[in-house]
Amino acid sequence: MTDHKDPASFRDPSGFVYRDVSGKIFRQINRPYENEYQAIQASGLWDKLIADGLLVPHRPVPLDLRATDDAVAVLEPQPIPFISYPYEWCFGQLRSAALLTLEIQLRALEKGFVLKDASAFNVQFNGCKPVFIDTLSFEQYRENEPWVAYGQFCRHFLAPLALMRYRNTSLNRLLSIHIDGVLLECVSPLLPWQSWLRSGIAVHVHMLGKAEQAYKKKREVTEPVSGRLKKGNLIALVDSLKSTVRGLQYKQMQGLWTNYDSNESYSEAGVCAKRSWVRATLDKVKPAVTWDLGANTGEYSRMAAAAGSYVIGMDGDSSCIQHMWEANHDRVLPLAMDLSNPTPSLGWAHTERASLLERGPADCALALALLHHLAIGNNVPLDRLAVFFARCARCLLVEWVPKEDPQCQRLLVSRRDIFTNYTREAFEHFFTSQFDIDDMLELPQSGRVLYRMQSKIVGLAQ
Amino acid sequence: MQNKSHPRNPGFRSSIPVLATVGLICLFSASDAHAYLDGGTAAIVFQIVAATALGVLFYFKSLWWKVKRFFVRNPREEPGADD
């Protein structure tokens, strides 16, 4: 059988995720997990978690579909429309993923199980709803045994949440460097003294960080650590983590673009024409998956979702992403993404966590009121923009913003205009080397032009 | 699970007993630890100490909630309750 093992699924010997030749996703359960698998099935824990929408649904399929001979069972999980990573989430997303993990831990304990890991990468989003995807993260609870994933939970969730709450909402991006969670000894000195006043942060971040540092200094090899932790005390620990996460509330920062809608330089007729053209085009194209690049507060993401698309709304401003996430749309996944530096491939052998482009292409990409930010704000030449967009999606809805536009002029206020090539002619020249133009609309009382284009890249064109 | 606001944790006052208890236990227990020492080990040793202290607080918290539930029909927050 020719299968493709998921490059992120190799650490746990209990099983792994793979795709068959048609691209269908499966999870193989290996022999070492057989006893746990039987126990967990008998307990009804999975069924209850799936029924309550906490765990990704799956169905057992015949063993013939296994990828290797070590299999004792094969599950077919419901696919997640778009894989995202904690360093792309806003505060609210990471917080909800943390609460989901703790809720699952408490429910598992009730049924005599425990989470053997508490990685933020075990959570994915269906629209704005978090769902736990690592079905094999459960093992039977052993009486008086401490929670082995406690430190991991603090590094993956509490530490970045505290940094986002107290310092800057984009600091979860540290998780792209510290792929197994932000080291507490790094986080503790970065937090303000006021964070010591919150008991949960004091205990689970500051003091745990100090304990880890102290043990590192003492480093002596003797025997495995032994200690007993009563189940009641373990529940108290999880309850304390839960209270700590719940106590961390989003602190509104003045976002760059959350007021952008109202500041735009369109005439009323221009806005109406743009909205109706985009709506009509989306209805015509009917994309299954849309990437809204530079989504701002998500107006056009919601429009694409209304046209039946699953939308990934990306913006570099995490306050915009928080705003979109709070709208709680079930077909819009907001992600913090700096398009001048999009998520690269990360992790082991550069394959464990996929780059943005590796997770595409989308059926349609929206690049509305975006071009000038990349071309003028970030000095990216138009030919490079055309190549990037052509790799993003089969169909592109792009808005040309002329240099005379007030928004462009704002970008040029404090700098020399070196952008002699930033003209509509050059834009059309470079973009038609990558795309075929299917349709266009010049917006009234504005130099802005909307284009619908089809990618020429082999393998992408429909 | 999301988008609901909750009353903020009481700040400094609630921190004092936890900090003092955990701090004291850490102080007396850390020097006696014999283990293969790495970050994970520290988290496990620390967890046993912290959870023991938190267990005492949790007991009183649960007791308080039982009393509150007796008098108030729908208390807003409960130990272990869903978000």
Image: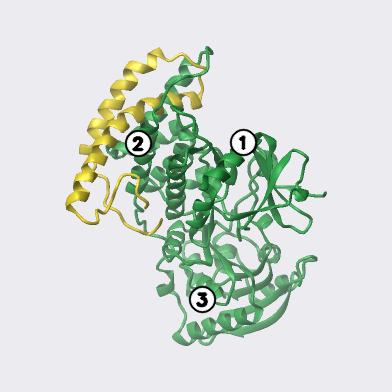
Q: Position of residue A329 (x, y in %)?
A: 47, 67
Q: Which residue is mark 1?
A: A35
Drawn side of residue A119 relative to residue A254, left or right: right
Q: Residue at x 48, y 87 (%)?
A: A269
Mark 2 → mark 1, Cα distance in angstroms: 28 Å
Tell which tag, 2 or 3, sits nearer the viewer.
2
Q: Position of residue B10 (x, y in %)?
A: 23, 44
Instruction: Name the one closer to the observer, A381 or A395.
Output: A395
Q: Chain of mark 2?
A: A
Q: Chain of mark 3?
A: A
Q: Residue at x 63, y 49 (%)?
A: A344
Dot 1 crowding, Cα within 10 Å, few <14, some 14–19, many 20+: few
Quarter of the C terminus of chain A within the rendering: bottom right
Q: Which residue is mark 3?
A: A405
Q: Which chain is yellow?
A: B
Q: Are marks 2 and 1 in contact (CB under 8 Å)?
A: no
Way the structure is coloured = by chain
Name which of mark 2 and mark 3 comes first in the sequence: 2
Q: Position of residue B39 (x, y in %)?
A: 49, 26
Q: Chain of mark 1?
A: A
Q: Which residue is mark 2?
A: A236
Please, is residue B28 above or below residue A237 in the view? above
Please, is residue A120 above or below residue A424 in the view? above
Amino acid at circle 2: Ala
Instruction: Name the one closer to the observer, B35 or A447.
Output: B35
Instruction: Name the one closer to the observer, A8 or A392.
Output: A8
Quarter of the figure with residue B49:
top left
